[in-house]
Amino acid sequence: MKPNPIVGQGTPLRLWQGSQHLAQLPEIDILSLVPPGSRAVIIAPHPDDEVLGCGGLLQLLAAAGRSLQLISVTDGSASHPGSERWPVEKLSVIRPQESAEALRRLGLPVHRLKWLRGGFSDGQVAARESELVAFIQRHIRPDDVLFSTWREDGHCDHEAVGRASAEAARRVGATFHELPVWTWHWASPEDSLVPWQRARKIPLAPALIARKRHAVHAFASQLEGDPQIGLPPVLAPYVLDRLLQPFEVVFL
């Protein structure tokens, strides 16, 4: 098992903001990736990844009237190990509720949004990866465009969900694109491990970023740690700042 790269405070935002490399990434219109008549399928390892990774992209697709399907693979209940304040039983109920509120804040038509729960165990997705491939495959069509976390994103669930999504898309003949989420924490702008040659930037207007920021703050459980056991917040301010830049990146 490779070491967990999600440690410490990660790469400072100023390094990303000052990167010429990142500034020069080619821009792409999300509506060209999901043409009229196609459906966008967002496959999130945990409740919040759909907003953190592509909250702006979702707003643009919804505003254009594209059909959307969201698949939440796990309930995110392992985010606070050992915490009495945030036990597994509480998180398994609260985290999906937080996602629903965040999607509402994004302005998505939640009542019309097709939303599937995978029921896989948080932190243990890789152990049932073949089952996840079959699950995703049952719910997608050849003309779908899938978006999920990058297969090398640095979190075991993100990587397993990315691999499973890619394989399901391959089997069905659907299109698959990847989203960096924890990559912004451990990577650097010039990091050769990141497939920058496949990266495209989706610019986000200030109103879209403001709505995404408002949506992210629906994830109250992730904004709080548990000081009694020395557990920091999952979404500390320095994590959010990196995920609320005026663009989102997709690997084609």
Image: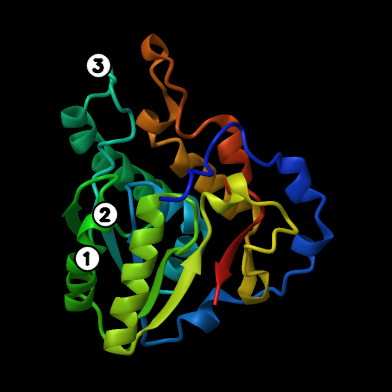
Give amino acid for label 1. Leu
Above or below for 14 versus 234: below
Q: Which residue is mark 1?
A: 132
Q: Which residue is mark 3?
A: 84
Dot 1, how many residues are within 10 Å of its Cα: few (below 14), some (14-19), or many (20+)?
A: many
Q: How is the image coloured?
A: rainbow
Residue 6 position, x and y percent, is 52, 41
Chain-order first, disc 3 or disc 2: 3
Above or below for 158 versus 162: above
- Residue at 40% across, 32% down: 222
Give the side of residue 250 with respect to residue 67, left or right.
right
Q: Which mark is residue 125?
A: 2
Give the side of residue 217 with respect to residue 37, left or right.
right
Q: Are the two marked residues, 1 and 2, in contact with CB atoms closer than 8 angstroms?
A: yes
Q: Which mark is residue 106?
A: none
Q: CA distance from mark 1 to mark 3?
A: 30 Å
Chain-order first, disc 1 or disc 3: 3
Q: CA distance from mark 3 to mark 2?
A: 24 Å
Q: Are the two marked residues, 3 and 2, in contact with CB atoms closer than 8 angstroms?
A: no
Residue 41 position, x and y percent, is 34, 71
Chain-order first, disc 1 or disc 2: 2
Whether residue 244 appears in this view of the structure is: no
Give amino acid for label 3. Glu
- Residue at 56% across, 39% down: 240
- Residue at 29% across, 47% down: 100
Give amino acid for label 2. Val
